[in-house]
Amino acid sequence: MSRRNGMIASVLVAGLLMSGCGTPRSGALGPAPAAAPSSTTPPSTTPPSTAPPSAAATDRPDPTPSVTPPRSPPTTPPGPAGTRDTVTIELWLVRAGQLVPTRRARPATLSTSRLALTELAAGPTPAEAAAGLTTLVPAGIEVTRITDGTATLRVPSVGDPAERRLREAQVVWTLTQFPTVRQVSLGGAGPVGRPDYADLLPPIVVTSPTAGERVAAPLVVTGTATVFEATVSVRVLDAAGREVATGFGTASCGSGCRGGYRVVVGWRAAREQQGTVEVYEVSALDGSRINTMAVPVILAPGA
């Protein structure tokens, strides 16, 4: 190569090295990063954007959802009475010298034993009173303690022995409905339970429906009974005393022992009206109705 040609080649190589043209540079660290397509300004000098996020950004899940403050619950009014924050308690009242159950739905409380005794002392509703139910328990009786399944309280020992025993039976049968109470200590005497007063139950006990309850067909009648051949019969009477439904069932135990029963009956009624549910035993001697328990109810129209 001549000296002139060598000088020309040197000038060309130097020009290529000084220009910015050609393919991206590469080396041990890989290709040089290309510029961001949305801006020609270097990232280190780009000011924070004040524009709203793009649609693509809003479609992405929030990487920190826990920092979002929870929304306040809706201020909807509470549901109707009996749907929540209520407790249904069983009360044992007295009719014709025997124990008869009924129920109350009341606002829930931690002291259910106090609530039960308060309701027991308050006595029957007008519908229950019309059915002959009453109470012998005075106001002011309270459970002083519950220890190892035994509730301790003092019941006034006034009146004749039969009345005192009925009063005690009301308290014992009412308190032992709760799982924390198996027995009751009445004023220093030994603990007693339901079996100690089982003779005060009528041959047929109706636990559902209760006096004054509005009932619809089909109606499920439940309770306990000790009757001949364990057979329990039911009939429903309308406001005029006409028989609109009948049925029968078998208790879980026959004569000489008490068992549970469940009888389902239906009826046809054109309007809502007063009615009566009668639960009875058919006499083995003459086929008549005996040991009848009559429960006044409100009959809803039946199809």
Image (spheres, helix red, strand yellow):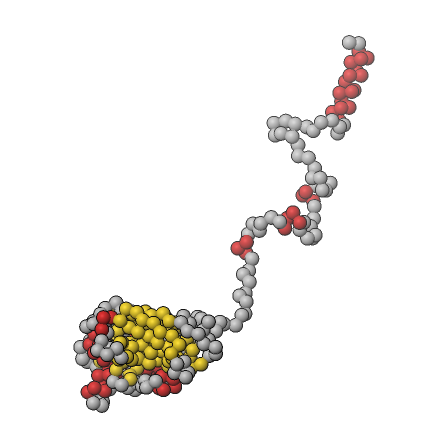
Q: Nearer the viewer, residue 51 or 177?
A: 177
Drawn side of residue 24 relative to residue 188, left or right = right
Which image quarter holds the N terminus?
Answer: top right
Q: Which of the 4 quarters of the picture holds residue 286?
A: bottom left
Residue 267 placement, left or right of 293: right
Residue 72 visible in the snapshot: yes
Report the residue at 33% width, 81% height from top.
294
Q: Quadrant of residue 302?
A: bottom left
Residue at 69% over, 50% down: 49
Depth check: 31 or 227 in front? 227
Is residue 210 left or right of 258 when viewed as pictured?
right
Residue pushed farthest front?
286
The image quarter in which residue 201 lies: bottom left
Q: In the depicted view, which residue is nearer to us: 121 or 71?
A: 121
* Vertical arrangement, residue 164 with respect to residue 46, above or below: below
How many marks can you see?
0
Residue 62 lies left or right of residue 174; in this view the side is: right
Residue 108, image x, y percentages? 39, 74
- At 70% from the left edge and 52% from the top edge, which residue is drawn? 51
Farthest top residue in view: 1
Depth check, front residue: 275 or 100: 275
Where is residue 109 shown, x and y percent of the image?
Answer: 38, 74
Q: Is residue 232 above or below residue 98?
A: above
Residue 164: image location, x then y, percent: 22, 86
Q: Residue at x 52, y 72 (%)?
A: 77
Residue sticking out furthest to the right: 4
